[in-house]
Image (cartoon, helix red, strand yellow):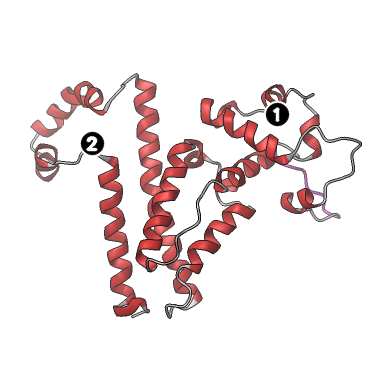
């Protein structure tokens, strides 16, 4: 449940409140413990399994204990996002902008696949600013700093790569969850189950190019190849726009 805002008193941001917690005789909880427990729940059972009661049970505290740090589930989701973004390893920073953006994309994909609920956050949390999330953006921007780009172009590059990653990996996560829901253990099993429908659709003759793809594509079941190839197309486009030497054309 979202926090109620007073018209007279400005709302203090979550991260500012956590920097200056109210005094307590003893601390049985920390934001890190709350976040870790919530992440474990979501990793195992999905976002829908997170409730303040379930979280209290996992932490072995009374249900109201967590409210010293959070005002409800919205705050918990922000803590979770920040917690998992801390897992991102620093970029190397020495291989040039293109390889840095490739590393940024690949490690973000790995993070989402490790925590699929990241692809299913509600809008108000998917866009939230947290310290480790902003640090990831800062790091990506720093890899573009000093190559002659203006600030708007630097952010456009980072956002374009991030949008590609979240789009294609979101589809990958959705496919995995759909297969799990249908009880399909592999891509081969999924294709076998869908074969009658596919044969009918292709048999209509209305989709000749898609028919050719189905019959001749070599990487239909290879999400890593699809991710890498699509990323190359994105980076090629950025490189063409930047021109020789990596500066804006």
Residue sitting at x 16%, y 22%:
196
Q: What stretch is highlighted in magenta?
A: 1-7
Residue 64: in sight, yes or no?
Answer: yes
Q: Which numbered dot is residue 52?
A: 1
Residue 23 image point, x, y percent? 90, 43
Q: Name the residue under label 2.
A: 221
Above or below, 200 relative to 172: above
Residue 109 appears left or right of 125: left
Residue 175 appears left or right of 22: left
Residue 10 image point, x, y percent? 81, 56
Above or below, 131 relative to 36: below
In the structure shown, which secondary structural element does the residue marked by tag 2 occupy? Answer: loop
Residue 108 appears left or right of 78: left
Residue sitting at x 37%, y 28%:
178
Magenta stretch encompasses residue 67:
no
Q: Which of marks 1 and 2 is nearer the N terminus?
A: 1
* Disc 2 packing (10 Å; few <14; some 14–19; many ≥20): few
Residue 28 image point, x, y percent? 80, 32
Residue sitting at x 70%, y 28%:
52
User: Where the N terminus falls, by quadrant?
Assistant: top right
Residue 44 image point, x, y percent? 52, 26
| Residue 62: quarter of image | top right
* Disc 1 packing (10 Å; few <14; some 14–19; many ≥20): many
Outermost residue, top side: 183
């Amino acid at each position: 449940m979202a926090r109620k805002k007073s018209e007279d008193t400005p709302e203090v941001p979550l991260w500012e409140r956590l920097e200056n917690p109210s005094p307590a005789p003893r601390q049985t909880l920390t934001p890190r413990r709350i976040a870790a427990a919530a992440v474990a729940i979501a990793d195992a059972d999905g976002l829908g399994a997170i409730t303040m009661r379930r979280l209290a049970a996992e932490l072995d505290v009374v249900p109201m204990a967590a409210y010293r740090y959070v005002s409800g589930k919205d705050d918990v989701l922000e803590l979770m996002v920040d917690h998992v973004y801390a897992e991102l390893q620093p970029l190397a920073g020495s291989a040039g902008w293109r390889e840095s953006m490739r590393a940024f994309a690949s490690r973000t994909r790995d993070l989402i696949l490790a925590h699929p609920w990241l692809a299913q956050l509600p809008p108000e949390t998917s866009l939230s600013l947290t310290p480790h999330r902003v640090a990831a953006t800062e790091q990506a921007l720093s890899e573009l700093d000093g190559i002659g780009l203006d600030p708007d172009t630097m952010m456009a590059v980072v956002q374009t790569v991030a949008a590609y990653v979240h789009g294609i990996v979101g589809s990958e996560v959705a496919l995995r969850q759909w297969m799990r829901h249908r009880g399909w253990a592999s891509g081969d099993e999924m294709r076998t189950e869908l074969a009658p429908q596919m044969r009918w659709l292709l048999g209509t003759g209305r989709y000749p190019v898609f028919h050719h793809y189905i019959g001749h594509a070599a990487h239909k079941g290879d999400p890593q190849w699809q991710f890498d190839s699509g990323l190359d197309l994105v980076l090629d486009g950025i490189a063409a726009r930047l021109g020789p030497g990596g500066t804006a054309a």
